[in-house]
Image (spheres, rainbow, N blue to C red):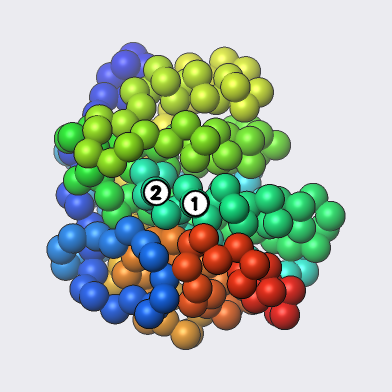
Amino acid sequence: MSRSARRSVRTVTALAVGALALAAMTSCAPAAPAPAVTPTTATSSPAVLPSSQKGAAHFDEGYLQLGDGPKTVDLYFDPICPYCKKFESLSGPLLFSAVEQGEATLRLHPLAFLDRLSAGTAYSTRAASYLTAVAVEHPDHLQAFFQQLFDQQPAENTPGLSDEQLDELARAAGIPSPEDLDPNAYAGWVTQRTQLAAQGPLSTTTQIPRISHVPVVMVDADVFGGNSVDTADFAAFYASR
């Protein structure tokens, strides 16, 4: 199959849950009740989902890993969510520094709550799938590409970045021959993990039953209840765990 065929845009059902939310958290939320979990939503025919660990991707547990420090941070996000971008730009440096210093393990949970906000191109799924492909094939470049996704985040209600533009972001992150990646191989996994997160229960915490909005960040299973721009509050929260 040609690369263009592998990467053809697939329509993905917008996923969501009801209105449970942390009181103070400014966030992006999905729009409708989540459908039943199925591994075939993202494709027109049944597909075998990836499993086990490949590179930095822990498929069975549902995250992409940066670092291996003793403190565990779980970050649930959607690539097109502007509040996720705010959190990454303001609190990301603290977390990336903690990873670099061997203090923390950062577990990225890419979700596709907001496909409906990319003019039919399923950008959230495409970008999350691309990030997953990077985690598998180029784990040393995962952080750099993650940062590129938010540095160059498209506006909501636009088609988002094209596959070729995502390739350019990958090159900017130092990834050689990004055209050889196959992000569509992970679209079904992104869809499944989005549905599982929306429905709950969560394996990362017992403090909330499911993910009803993004971003959601946890430190050692404690959920941060502040705003995406509350940088000092998050730093204190992180330090206290």
Q: Position of residue 147 (x, y in %)?
A: 57, 39
Please identify the quadrant where the N terminus is shown: top left
Who is closer to the viewer here, 235 or 67?
Answer: 235
Q: Relative to 163, does residue 93 appear above or below in the rendering?
A: below
| Circles 2 and 1 in contact, beta carbons < 8 Å | yes
Nearest the viewer among 26 and 62 is: 26
Q: Quadrant of the C terminus?
A: bottom right
Give the percent coordinates (x, y) of residue 215. Answer: 44, 61
Is residue 53 visible to the viewer in this orientation of the structure?
no
Q: Residue at x 37, y 62 (%)?
A: 27
User: The residue tagged with tag 2: helix, strand or loop?
Assistant: helix
Amino acid type at mark 2: Pro
Count of numbered circles on the image: 2
- Residue 173, located in which quarter of the rendered image? top right
Residue shown at 42% from the left, 20% from the top: 165
| Left-right relation of 7 to 86 | left
Q: Which residue is mark 1?
A: 86
Residue 17, horizontal then vertical, whole percent: 23, 69
User: What residue is disc 2 on?
Assistant: 82
For mark 1, give the secondary structure.
helix
Q: What is the CA distance from the residue labelled 2 to the residue labelled 1?
A: 6 Å
